[in-house]
Amino acid sequence: MTGKALAYLLAVCLLLVGCSEPSIDGSSERAFHDSAAKVASQLSPAERWAFTDALLLVTMTGIDFGTPLAEGEQLDFEGAIARLHGMSAEEIMAMADELRRLHLE
């Protein structure tokens, strides 16, 4: 492959990566907050509200609030955000819609 063709291929790959939809990074709590803010910043105000609502619902759904915590024990927030890793705003909102639908049945 010539240098010119390789440079063109690299430019196309970088363009595709740059155009990808932002997603949630569930690798740590800090990464989660930063990526959620980045995802939300790409949305209209109405979509941002819907995304925030969906994010709270989906995140909290995986946490058991019915069981008392032992002394020093914390809720499994890390597990909840890890389940969202790699998901887009659209995927999270669809998951929240499904949870709402299941709850109403």
Image (cartoon, helix red, strand yellow):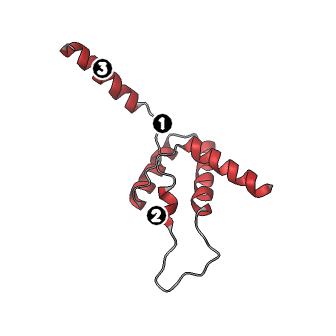
Which quarter of the figure is the N terminus placed in?
A: top left
* Mark drawn on residue 8: none
Q: Earlier in the sequence, mark 2 or mark 3?
A: 3
Q: Quadrant of residue 33?
A: bottom left
| SS of the residue under disc 1 | loop
* Mark drawn on residue 21: 1
Q: Position of residue 92 (x, y in %)?
A: 58, 47
Q: Viewer-proximal residue, 62 or 35?
A: 62
Q: Are marks 2 and 1 in contact (CB under 8 Å)?
A: no
Q: Earlier in the sequence, mark 1 or mark 3?
A: 3
Above or below, 77 relative to 18: below
The amino acid at mark 1 is Glu
Question: Which of pointers 1 and 3 indicates the residue nearer the eye?
Answer: 3
The amino acid at mark 3 is Leu
Residue located at (42% from left, 61% from top): 29
Q: Is residue 67 left or right of residue 2?
A: right
* Mark drawn on residue 9: 3
Question: Which of pointers 2 and 1 indicates the residue nearer the eye?
Answer: 2
Residue located at (58% from left, 67% from top): 63
Label 2 sits on residue: 78
The amino acid at mark 2 is Glu
Report the Cα–Cα distance between label 2 and label 1: 23 Å
Residue located at (24% from left, 18% from top): 6
| SS of the residue under disc 2 | helix
